[in-house]
Amino acid sequence: MATTVHEPPQIKPSRSPGVGGHNGWRNLVPSDGDLRAVKDYSPPPASTGIWVGLAAISMTFAALTSALVVRQGSSDWRHLSLPAILYFNTLVLLASSVTLEMSRRQVATFMGGVGNQAVKPTRWLYLTLLLGLVFVAGQYAAWKQLSGQGVYLASNPSSSFFYVFTAAHALHVLGGLGGLIYVINKIKNSVLRRSTLDAASRYWHFMGVLWVYLLLLLWLKL
Amino acid sequence: MPAKTGAGLKPEFVYEASMAKIFAITIVLIAIGSAIPIVLHTWYLPQDISTHGPLIDEQFSETMAEAGISFLAAQIILAAFIWIYSKPAAGTKIKTFPGGAMGLVIAAFLLVGTEVLALGAFGAKAWASVYFTPPAANALTIQSQAGQFAFYFRYPGPDGKFGQIHPELVNEGSQNFFGLDLDHDPAAKDDIVTAEMAVPVNREVHLLMHSKDLGHSFFVRELRIQQDFVPGLDVSVHFTANKTGKYEIVCTQLCGLGHYNMKAYLEVMSEADYETWLKQQATMQ
Amino acid sequence: MHDISTHPVAHHAPPETFIRKYIFSLDHKVIGKQYYGLALVAVFIGMGLSWLMRLHLGWTNMSIPGLELLSKNGAPGGIMTPEYYLQLMTMHGTIMVFFVLTTAPFAAFGNFFLPIQVGAEDMPFPRFNMMSFWVTFVAFLVLMASFFAGDGPSLAGWTQYAPLSAVGAVAGPGQGLGEVLWASSIAIFCIGQLLGSLNFITTTLDMRTRGMSMMRLPLSAWAWFITSVMGLTAFAVLMPACILLILDHVAGTSFFVPGGLVLNDQLQPHSGGSTLLWQHLFWFFGHPEVYIAIIPGMGIVSHVLIANMRRPMLSHRVLIYSMAALGVLSYMVYGHHMFVSGMNPLSSLAFSFPTLIITIPSTIVVLIWIGSLYGSKLRINTASLFALGFISMFVSGGVSGFFLAQPSIDIILHATYFVVGHFHLVMAVAAIFGIFAGTYFWFPKMFGRMMNETLGKIHFWFSFVGAYCIFMPFHYLGIAGNVRRYQAFVDDFMQPLIPVHKFITVAALVTGAAQLIFLYNLIHSRWWGEPAPLNPWEATSLEWSTPTSPPPFDNFGGKHPVVYHDPYQYGVESSTGDYVMQDSPEKVQSALPEEA
């Protein structure tokens, strides 16, 4: 541990606590004691938080993937034809990521004081929400189609994995829809923090990426 | 003026040399006391009756020596430091262990690193003798089946072939433990099913292991063999017993309420006695 | 202009109502105490279960008065049935590992002290934090409910190997509803822990106060941080495993059950599943889990020892790197639970090497602790006694790991009492000693009162000597061939070992009874203990800078501390004595030479 030898710094009383008062990686108080030189930026917790959440979700799907790989080695593995509607659902989900990006641009201009201040920029967000709901409905339609063909959760190992993966993903998408509703609510009724919007967007885009991965996995393995 | 260390703290929170000394002595007594039953072999490994056992037992003894020395050294030095440093004289300065942290890190890497790698490398040899050598061509093949809560064994009979297992035909009531199709399967007709396992001494045995229902395990302490039965996967082990006698085969994988009582006997006999036993079992089918 | 400032927000208004203050509280300190309370209830239930188990093992046919009230079927006339023993054993392990060892050192102390040690007002997501406790509480209730299921709780052990755990009620009592409740409880528990990890990680990375660099964090904070990262990955794997297990039970899937299984003369309607898959998924979680149980203890013990040695550890960084190395390596060793499982024997060898290598960071940690004692000024009080006891216990538990790390020796020790002795010494004793050290050390800050030191020392002596009397003999039993998870020892081979079991049972009952001294001390001191000074241990880290004990709602009374020093400036000359607090602007010359 290094010796610390320095003069006590002058703390400026005008610095209100909480605003920029939290430090990042290199925030040692310098030897001349001038706090103004200290880097104040620290990532907003929502940003770190969403990465943490995405890491956990990734581990869960990684565990399920390894289960699939092991299970696939069994003699009773049967090929499952993916219902065609899945491809439509994929486009819908990817489109929702596009609409979300459009809405972020709108929110940014709104926040910057440019453009029509009377209209809150929720239109594209509602569209994203709608597309998300269409996706979930489309997944449900895929399940209906399969069960109509007599393929259920326990019918064979590949169908088990199909339902487990798609249901797990859909559940997380529903969570993402909840996040979008929260963002819309904040814009309309109080203050939307930039980090909140970023976190919700990151989560939503991850749902799209995750879905593309799952679709590939299911298409290759099932 | 710097205040005196511990000023304001009640005495029982500060330097309590007498309790420290008692603690140090206790640690040493416990350490030595723990070592005594090991050194005296009060409770120790059962006798070894297998050809691969000596490698395992030697590995065990070496590990015990190294673990034992590490254990005693660590506890005694901990106790010594507790004794010595709990009554600092007034004005004592904090001292640093010679070599500091880096010295200890290097010591850990060198001592522990070489020791564990040596143990690992040598232990691989013992492991290989059990798992990486194929069974001998003339090994006696026996199949064991584990199911709630009993072991059964099957000898292939004069045709040297095992009949097919049909799970749907398993019936405890009619004693068809292996689910053999005695009516239609010629290989099954001469199979000899027994509740105990007999093997000739000094003859290699190739034990096929099949699970009827759940996870079980085959453990004969004296044989130095322990292997899980894996439902859905037929595994096998091979061994040579080199001492006659009767030994317990116990289940060591939790399999339900009867797990504690799930056992069979391994009888190691002379070649002649084994042949007699086998003929006798054949007549009882 | 709308406010889109980027500053992290942890402020929330102080609670007004009783419910907001004590029940659904957003305050990390209350949440920490709630977790502690949950762990306290759980540990006494778990200990009670172990008494029942030990009584039965020592005196198998004895009627235990009152046991028939707990379960009519499980203990008719007070005599425990074989299945009930296994059910109690399963609950004992599950409660202890999840609701005590993951909860107390990590969730309880971590929630209370991590935000304070980094200099924050609270964690960044207080609502998620509150949810994490209540979700964990619900998980506990679901698990307890399995005691009241028709034929009792699951009997498959805390490890729940398939197919026993997956085929359903046909496998045995408790494997119907009891099993589903077990798997549900644990899946819910995983969610609670993930919410907790979320807060711990973001607190450590984003909420540190001015001057608090990562290297200036106390060792306890580092331990909680490392543990929370591990928890994120480990619990996120156990949860889907439990869900797949539930599906095998209720939905007829065959993730873990192969075909061709015959139970009760009936062919089971499953096919193609893999029993080893469950083991891989479970132990991928299970091995990091045991490090999740011990690493906070290492951090707490280091923290407590430093204050009582009046010097920092020989190297702060080496301890951090070693704990981190333990965390990382713990993912690579999990196959050592599966050496004889039927997995490829080459894999067994492959897993044994990292298992042996993980000895190195463990040894470094122990050597640094012992090496730091050299030349120190060691204060003996209950907290430091438990911290020193932790070192002794960790060494004892650790050396038996040498044996189990080698597949060839595992052949003769797997599933014997040797394993049970090993993990009890490191988990049931060392980790619990870490909890005790933390309790005696931090109680004055949490409640503003001192715990009774005489009672504390009595508690320590019974626990230290008693724990060795209980668990050291387990190793001898294992070497002699005593198989584990047996409810009784009915064969000739085992008869000579039964007197050892009787001795262990007596030791367990006495040591367990001594824990009631701790409980009494805890409760009595909470309300009638001697008022504590703000910094009774003359310690340096930020929790001792709070203006009151217990700390005020926002931890520092409207101020944000500024950190000027490394966390363990002891052995210096300052106006306060031989130490300087982290947020003191006083200039000091360290008494120690420059160290890494």
Image (cartoon, rainbow, N blue to C red):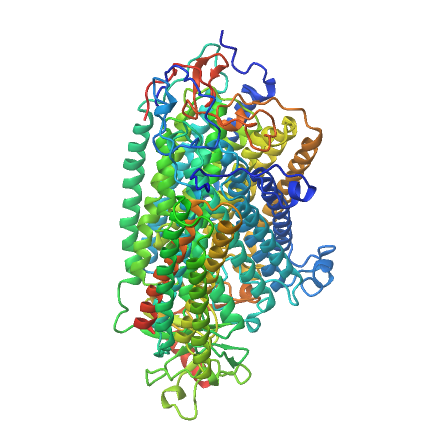
Residue A125, compared with residue C297, is above or below; it is below
Residue C560, compared with residue C146, is above or below; it is above
**Quarter of the image holding residue A28?**
top left
Q: Choose between A141 and C593: the one closer to the eye.
A: A141
Residue B266 visible in the current orientation: no
Quadrant into which the C terminus of chain C falls: top left
Q: Choose between C224 and C267: the one closer to the eye.
A: C224
**Quarter of the image holding residue B228?**
bottom left
Residue furthest bottom in the image: B183
Residue C55, compared with residue B278, is above or below; it is above
Residue shown at the point (40%, 53%) measured from the top left: A201
Provide residue B52's location: percent of width, then percent of height: 32, 59
Residue shown at the point (41%, 16%) measured from the top left: A8
Q: Choose between C14 and B18: the one closer to the eye.
A: C14
What is the total number of numbered labels drawn onto the structure image?
0
Provide residue C68's location: percent of width, then percent of height: 72, 60
**Quarter of the image holding residue C83?**
bottom right
Quadrant into which the N terminus of chain C falls: top left
Residue C462 visible in the current orientation: yes
Q: Choose between A222 and C64: the one closer to the eye.
A: A222
Provide residue C406's location: percent of width, then percent of height: 35, 51
Provide residue B173's location: percent of width, then percent of height: 55, 83
Residue B272, compared with residue C220, is above or below; it is below
